[in-house]
Amino acid sequence: MQGGCFSISSLGGIGGTAFTPIINAPEVAILGVSKSATKPVWDGKAFVPRLMLPLSFSYDHRVIDGAGGGALHRLSRGAARRHAPGDALQLRGSMNEATQ
C-alpha cells in the first residue's frame, strides 16, 4: 500500500499479548492486533469467560492529539463490545461522536 495514513499490524499468528507498533512514514497511526484469548471477566456478579482481543494504538502526536487518539480507542472498544464472535468487526461513527 502506498500513500496511506493508517495501517494495521497483526502479531496474532505468533502469539503475545501486546506490542508497540511502529509508525511508518508518511502514515500517522497504526493499530496493532495481538492474539485473542478467553479470559475470566467480572460481570458484577460472577466471573464469566470472555474472548479478549488485545489492541495497541500508536499515533504521531504532531498530527493526532491525545483526545483524538483516546476517542479512536473508545470507538473501537465500543464496536468490539457489540461484536458477535465470527462476524466482521466494523467501526461505525466518527471520532467526534466518540468524544461526546
Image: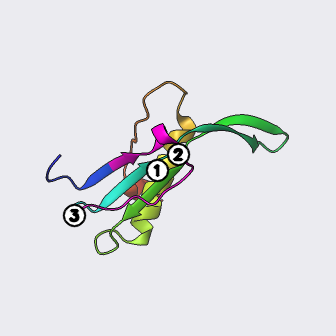
| Alpha carbon separation for disc pair 2 and 1 | 5 Å
What crowding class fits label 1: few (fewer than 14 Cα within 10 Å), some (14-19), or many (20 or more)? Answer: many
Residue kind at label 2, given as amino acid type: Gly
In magenta stretch: residue 13: yes
Identify the residue position indicated by label 1 in the image: 75
Q: Which residues are drawn in magenta?
A: 8-25
Identify the residue position indicated by label 3 in the image: 25
**Residue 85 position in % (x across, y down):** 55, 27
Q: Is residue 9 above or below residue 72?
A: above
Residue furthest out toward the bottom: 62
- Magenta stretch, main secondary structure, is loop
Front position among marks 3 and 2: 3
Which badge, 3 or 2, is on the more N-terminal residue? 3
Q: Are marks 2 and 1 in contact (CB under 8 Å)?
A: yes
Front position among marks 3 and 1: 3
Label 3's element? loop
Inspect this view and state whether residue 99 appears. no
Residue kind at label 1, given as amino acid type: Leu
Residue furthest out toward the right: 45
What crowding class fits label 3: few (fewer than 14 Cα within 10 Å), some (14-19), or many (20 or more)? Answer: few
Residue kind at label 3, given as amino acid type: Ala
Of residue 23 and residue 66, the one placed in the foreground of this image is 23
Residue occupying image coordinates x 22% and y 64%: 25
